[in-house]
Image: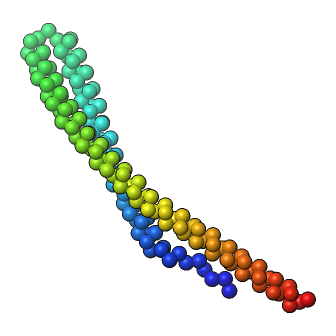
Amino acid sequence: MAKAFKFELQDVLDFRNYEKEGAQNELAKALAVEAQIKNQLQTIASKFISVRKQIDDSSDFEDIATGNRHKVLLESQKEDLLKQLAEAKIVTDEKRAALAEVMKKTTALEKLKEKQLAAFNEEEDRVEAEMIDDLANRQV
């Protein structure tokens, strides 16, 4: 006798959840790119320290000159990576904002569904209580 609850906007909510998953995946990819660039910067920093130590320990002019050229190359790579990191952070911020917007829309629909479900349950409880009262009154 009790009818099942049906949320009229369930298809829209499902679509919003699908969008939310996509936005979460896009943000994860952007964060992974940032992390990869940071790892590359760490590698360059380690190499820079190693080259600097070689230069300091060496007394051969050729080794010192080679080390300095290597340092210049590492500096250039570092600058390129810092530019890439800045661009990646912009992309990450955009993805984060897109996710926030999708989550806001999804949350609004979820709250609407919860309110409608609560109202449905209250109505079901009221109808059930009326039926019980009718049965009790019939037996008297």
Residue at point 12%, 15% (across, down): 64
Residue at point 82%, 83% (across, down): 133
Closer to the camera, 32 or 52?
Answer: 32
Residue at point 26%, 39% (across, down): 85
**Residue 24 visible, this orientation:** no
Is 74 located above or below residue 67 in the figure? below
Residue 109 at x, y percent in the picture: 49, 66
Is 88 located above or below residue 40 in the figure? below
Q: On the rendered image, what quadrant is the N terminus found in?
A: bottom right
Is 100 located above or below residue 49 in the figure? below
Figure colour scheme: rainbow
The image quarter containing residue 113 is bottom right
Residue 82 at x, y percent in the picture: 23, 35
Is 99 located above or below residue 90 in the figure? below
Furthest toward the top, the residue is: 59
Residue 8 at x, y percent in the picture: 50, 77
Direction from residue 119 to residue 71 in the image, left or right: left
Direction from residue 41 to residue 121 in the image, left or right: right
The image quarter containing residue 50 is top left
Q: On the rendered image, what quadrant is the C terminus found in?
A: bottom right
Closer to the camera, 96 or 62?
Answer: 96
Direction from residue 71 to residue 115 in the image, left or right: right
Furthest toward the right, the residue is: 140
**Residue 137 visible, this orientation:** yes
